[in-house]
Image (cartoon, rainbow, N blue to C red):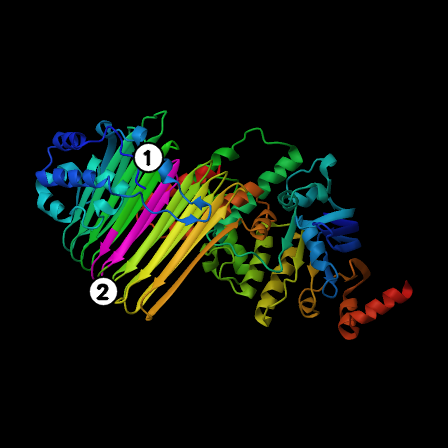
Amino acid sequence: MATLEIKNLHARVAEEDGEQILRGVDLEVKSGEIHALMGPNGSGKSTTSKIIAGHPAYEVTDGEILLHLEDDDFGDLEIPDDVRTWNLLELEPNERAALGIFLGFQYPAEIEGVTMTNFLRTALNAKIDEREELLFGEDDEEEEEEAGYDTSPMEGNVDDGEVGVAEFQKLLKEKMELLDMDEKFMQRYLNAGFSGGEKKQNEVLQAAILEPSIAVLDEIDSGLDIDRLQDVSKGINALRDEQGTGILQITHYQRILEYVEPDHVHIMLDGKVVKSGDASLASELEDKGYDWVREEVYEAA
Amino acid sequence: MSAQLPANLSAETVREISDARDEPEWLLEARLEALEALDELELPDVIQTPGRRWTNLEALDFESLVDPLNQADETTRESPEGVVVLPFTEALSEYGDLIEERFGSVVDPESNYLTALSAALFTTGTFIYVPEGVDAEDVKIRAEMNSRSLFSHTLVVTEESSSVTILEAIESGDSVDDARYFSNLVEIDAGENSYVQYGSLQNLDEETYTYSLKRADADTYSTVNWIEGNLGSRLTRSDVETELNGEASETKIVGAFFGHDDQHLDVNARVWHKAENTTADLVTRGVLDDEARSVYEGVQDVGRDAWSTNSYQRENTLMLSDQSEADASPKLIINNHDTEASHAASVGQVDAEDLFYMVSRSIPEEQARNMLVEGFFVPVLEEIAVDEFRDDLEELIAARLR
């Protein structure tokens, strides 16, 4: 079981006189749990998610983000004792992803010329390689360098990586069925021309393929019609139920929480988590609004 | 200002080239005329903005670059059934009359100093003839340049309702220490309702200066599609042009370039709409790394009589380094109000959010960047009809990235 532990996280926009956005965030998400992170616009929810993933636009000024792994987190792969706790802030974004952090984007990039199949198979193989490198040290057989030649933008490098084309196609098809996604997406360019809903479905699909320990989903529910919301919710629940993924779901709306029931609800205000509770907190919030939280918090202070 | 005539260039030289190839009198005369015109001709126009010329052709030292009597190349030609694909010289005995009639009819040898030089001195090139109604796929011409200078002239003639797809690739053979010069003129005379795709892949070594002018005359209902790939050379000046002379004729000019180190690539696409219902689509995608520099000019000229014209132009340059430089000048000249047209050019870097998206999915940054660059070229790759050309271009792009 993996645990994502955020301690006293302070961060600002990484430019001269960049605005301070996070002012001491504390959060803990374990595998298999579903957390909802709510809060008004500008409270720092999205920034928190981007910093977990390692977005270069932000600079952490204080605090830390730790990932604690346990023996069974990577299936049969034995994790040596001395590499079970990682300081994410010291890792590159791709290394964080390799250790099981996933960020579902609020606005996923549209990438022309790179097919879904190529992208996801490349990502899966890169994850497997990088994870081994992090856990067991550098690969001696520098085989990656040669790989460049046989590549194609449509299929990716045919011979490269642990997971071959045929095996990957099968995996992808399985996961797409689960999400009720049309197979035609496989050969389409990554998010290019996808509707808002299709992009969000695609984020959940990618999580299903990469099997993260912790998935941070940034407003995965925005802009979804009711059918798509149900598909996406089904996908999120499957991540938790079938892969044991811990979910940190950032949302403005109670609506998705009816389909993806959170174990914990946290409310952010002005760059801090100010209140936590169970699912009932979300309904209370829906009734009373953020002013109620604000009053409660600042009165107590 | 015209360039200095190399001292080793004389009527004698031209006669020697022509005699050695046992050419007909008319061709010798054409060469001599071109030679004579050199005195009067200017180098091709280059764009000038205050304080600088975008490409400095004047700096080329033709005296040392041009070595007319020692030209050498090794060229292989593959042709499918039904189409004539011959070395230019060999074609003269059987197709002399046709060649005499069409030679220089699309590319005027006296267009500029460099075309005249090429017409006077060319020793290699290909004659491609597609008879009426013949469909020919995958004509492949692969040339290797083995001398200090090489001048090539290619003539493509397609008869009514024929079609052909062509790949022409040029690279360097024996390595020569000094600078080299490669000149390539290509003329396409596209007959009524015929289809031509002419793909060209230039991957010469980076000591070579290249001048290339490719021009098509598109007859009624014909389509001429160009694919122009430039990866090699120290400096390239490439012009790809179509005159849409026939009603309802169409053209696409698709370009890809990828410069690195201190390469200078000056690529140009031009179309003249001269008849009704004509369509043009100009698409160029280029990538620059290190200190490479690109210059692009695109021209869509819609004539007075070109009613109901559709004309589109896009050029995008992606910079991988802060030291690279790109200039672009898309031009749209409209003399007819019944026209649907657009033109745009952009210069930018790899999108940081795209990159972060990919990296957040475990893909290492450099690999992600490479995928984005390869993806950037896909719209060009998708246009290519000759599989081998697409594979080669893809491979060269992949190799340059790694």
Left/right placement of residue B332 relative to residue A8 reads left
Give the image location of residue B56, x and y in percent: 39, 40
Residue B12, located in which quarter of the rendered image? top left
**Which numbered mark, 1 or 2, is in the foreground of this view?**
2
Residue B196 at x, y percent in the picture: 24, 52
Query: The disc labelled 1 sits on which kind of residue?
Result: Glu
Range of the magenta residues?
A: B216-244
Q: Chain of mark 1?
A: B
Q: Are marks 1 and 2 on the same chain?
A: yes
Say if A122 sits above or below A228 in the image: above
Callouts 1 and 2 close, C-beta under 8 Å? no
Question: As rendered, which of B355 and A264 lies closer to the eye?
Answer: B355
For the point 69% across and 61% down, the residue is: A250
Measured from the top left, where is residue B276 in percent x and y?
A: 25, 67
Asked whether residue A116 appears in the rendered view, the answer is yes
Q: Residue at x 67, y 48 (%)?
A: A54
Q: Judge by depth and name the residue closer to the eye, B336 or B343.
A: B336
Q: Amino acid at mark 2?
A: Glu
- Say which residue label 2 marks: B247
* Mark 2: secondary structure: loop
**For the point 27% across and 66% down, which residue is it?**
B306
Relative vertical location of residue A42 with respect to residue B351 in this rendering, above or below: below
Q: Which mark is residue B171?
A: 1
Return the chain for callout 2: B
